[in-house]
Image (tube, coloured by chain):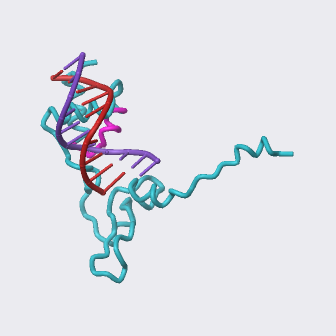
Chain colours: A cyan, B purple, C red
Amino acid sequence: MSWTDERIDRLRQLWGQGMSASEIAELLGNVTRNAVIGKAHRLGLSGRPSPIKKKPTRGATILSLNERMCKWPVGDPKHADFHFCGCPSLPGMPYCREHAQMAYQPAKKRDDERKLVMA
DNA sequence: CCCTGATTCGC
DNA sequence: GCGAATCAGG
């Protein structure tokens, strides 16, 4: 599969929209995130270390973080530098991917063996 | 542990 | 120029 102008255009657009490489890759199809990143980098694009941590949608205050902003207390509530992550949180998740997995780390319990143990 | 993008390496 | 592998950060 070669990079056609259409695909490159989609790549640049999606990338510019803040889509992650894996998302773009999956959306385009037949490409891996590496291919997308490689092409993006070759095109002169970048985004630096995790551009998604930014806020594509501006207008964010502590009052408006009840939208899809990651509400993760950083530092100490009594400290002056206490702030929220503010990263785009996942659907249904009060936290972003970074903190969501941290919050749900110890969450894994399956009763698959139940049917085996069931007397 | 998972993910992200960046850079490097070989084809 | 292409993508995968590898590197580095969160």
Was residue A117 drawn as part of the magenta stretch in this picture? no
Figure check: A105 above or below B3: below
Figure check: A47 above or below A103: above
Q: In the displayed image of the protein, which residue is found farthest to the right?
A: A119
Asked whether A93 or C4 is in front, the reply is: C4
Q: Is residue A74 left or right of residue A48?
A: right
User: Where does the image place residue A95, in percent across and percent down from the top left?
Assistant: 42, 60
User: Where does the image place residue A86, in percent across and percent down from the top left?
Assistant: 32, 63
Q: In the displayed image of the protein, which residue is found farthest to the left?
A: A44
Query: Residue sitting at 12 percent across and 37 percent down?
Result: A44
Query: Quadrant of residue B11 in the image?
Result: top left
Count of residue discs = 0
User: Where does the image place residue A1, in percent across and percent down from the top left?
Assistant: 28, 18
User: Where does the image place residue A65, in percent across and percent down from the top left?
Assistant: 35, 66
Q: Is residue C9 left or right of residue A70?
A: left
Q: In the displayed image of the protein, which residue is found farthest to the bottom?
A: A78
Q: Is residue A105 left or right of residue A43?
A: right
- Which image quadrant: the C terminus of chain A? top right
Figure check: A76 above or below A58: below
* Stretch in magenta: A16-26
Query: Residue sitting at 38 percent across and 62 percent down?
Result: A70
Query: Residue sitting at 35 percent across and 24 percent down?
Result: A30
Figure check: A32 above or below A50: above
Q: Main secondary structure of the magenta part?
A: helix
